[in-house]
Amino acid sequence: MKESITKRAWRRIYTIIVEADNMILKWIGWIPSHHIRRFFYRIDGVKIGKGSTIHMGAIFYFPEKITIGNDSIIGENMVFDGRDAIIIGDHVDIASEVMIYNSEHDINDEKFKAITAPVEIGDYVFIGPRAIILPGVKIGKGAVIGAGAVVTKDVPDFACVVGNPAKHLYWISKTGERLNFNKENEAADTNGNRYKLVINPEAKTAERVIEIE
């Protein structure tokens, strides 16, 4: 069934409104003041926690679905695809030109219909320059994403991943140190934080790292 003229007209009007909002947000992104940019981003719906900074050139799509926690840093020319939820935790450091997407085309659909899935980034995560985070990905606490990595699946807590597609390299602490586990699968960083390596009993491989309280 063909789309009615009225529906098509409203859809085009809605598209113009959305693109106009995107254009205004791009202009705001080049204002040379953290405080002014943050003020207008919040007005347009971005939820920004206390002490967080967004550097110049950020691009937002559907800002009302984007949440940034406390004391986080967003680098220059960041791309936020807000067609589904993007949740960024506290004390997160995202470098320049990182792209977070949560919508993609279904290549099995004859019209390449868009499908969406939320992206969640945990506390104390570092994401290197020009990394790409794809729809549905959850990045765990303390994880490190290498520069230029393409993250297509979940990253566990305290994992360091690199490459395209991103693959596990080693385990890392909250302080950024590589963790070396003893025979009991425990490790500690220089600040005294302690970690436990969890082994998958069936595959007999390292599954994730948990912090020992």
Image (cartoon, rainbow, N blue to C red):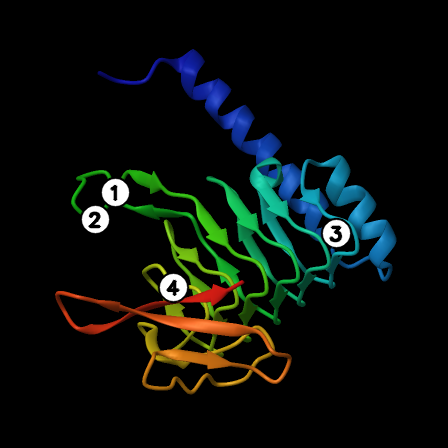
**Disc 3: which residue:** 27
Badge nearest the viewer, 4 or 1: 4
What percent of the width, then of the height, locates residue 26?
69, 52
**Disc 1: which residue:** 112
User: In which quadrant is the C terminus drawn?
Assistant: bottom right
Residue under the point 39% across and 84% down? 181
The residue positioned farthest toward the left in the image shown: 202
Disc 3 + disc 4, Cβ < 8 Å: no
19 over 1 or under it: above or below: below
**Disc 2: which residue:** 107
191 over 50 or under it: above or below: below
Q: Secondary structure at mark 2?
A: loop
User: Disc 4 to disc 1, how far (Cα)?
Assistant: 28 Å
Q: Is residue 111 visible?
A: yes
The answer to whether residue 79 is left or right of residue 55 is left
| Kind of residue indicated by mark 3 | Trp
146 over 14 or under it: above or below: below
The image quarter in which residue 97 lies: bottom right
